[in-house]
Image (cartoon, rainbow, N blue to C red):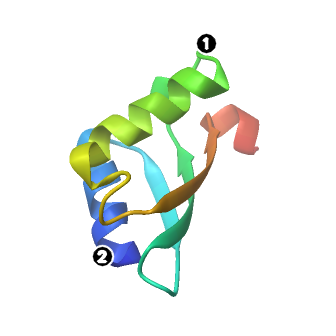
């Protein structure tokens, strides 16, 4: 697994999102996801939305994914 693939999957699942993913070892990743879809949602709900874009890869090929989820307004 690589950061580029994860970024593409998240972008496909959350159209219009801006996504940055880092992770050099192929199993541990960090992502910043900025999306209007997060408006009015608590952090746990936002994370679930991102995890849903990755499906069964979470806990499998993607061992860990640290998330920052923001709306465009929160990002500033």
* Position of residue 59 measured from the top left corner of the image (x, y, whole percent): 38, 53
Earlier-in-chain disc, 2 versus 1 = 2
Disc 2, SS? loop
Query: In the image, is residue 12 above or below residue 14?
Result: below
Query: In which quadrant will I find the N terminus?
Result: bottom left
SS at circle 1 = loop
Q: CA distance from mark 2 to mark 1?
A: 32 Å
x, y percent for residue 76: 76, 44
Estimate how packed mark 2 is, as few (under 14), some (14 to 19) or many (20 or more) residues with alpha carbons within 10 Å: some
Q: Are marks 2 and 1 in contact (CB under 8 Å)?
A: no
Of 19 and 3, nearer the camera is 3
Q: Residues within 10 Å of mark 1 (few under 14, many from 20)?
A: few
- Front residue of 2/12: it is 2
Name the one closer to the observer, 36 or 45: 45
Q: In the rendered image of this protein, does residue 52 appear above or below residue 37?
A: below
Per the image, the residue denoted by label 2 is 1
Name the residue beneath numbered marker 1: 40
Q: Reply above or below: 25 against 76.
A: below
Residue 56 appears left or right of 73: left
Looking at the picture, how far across and down is residue 14, in whole percent? 33, 39
């Amino acid at each position: 697994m690589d950061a580029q693939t994860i970024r593409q999957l998240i972008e496909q699942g959350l159209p219009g999102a801006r996504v940055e993913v880092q992770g050099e070892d192929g199993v541990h990743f960090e992502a910043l996801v900025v999306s209007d879809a997060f408006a009015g949602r608590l952090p746990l709900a936002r994370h679930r939305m991102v995890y849903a874009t990755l499906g069964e890869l979470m806990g499998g090929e993607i061992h860990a994914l640290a998330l920052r989820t923001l709306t465009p307004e929160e990002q500033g």
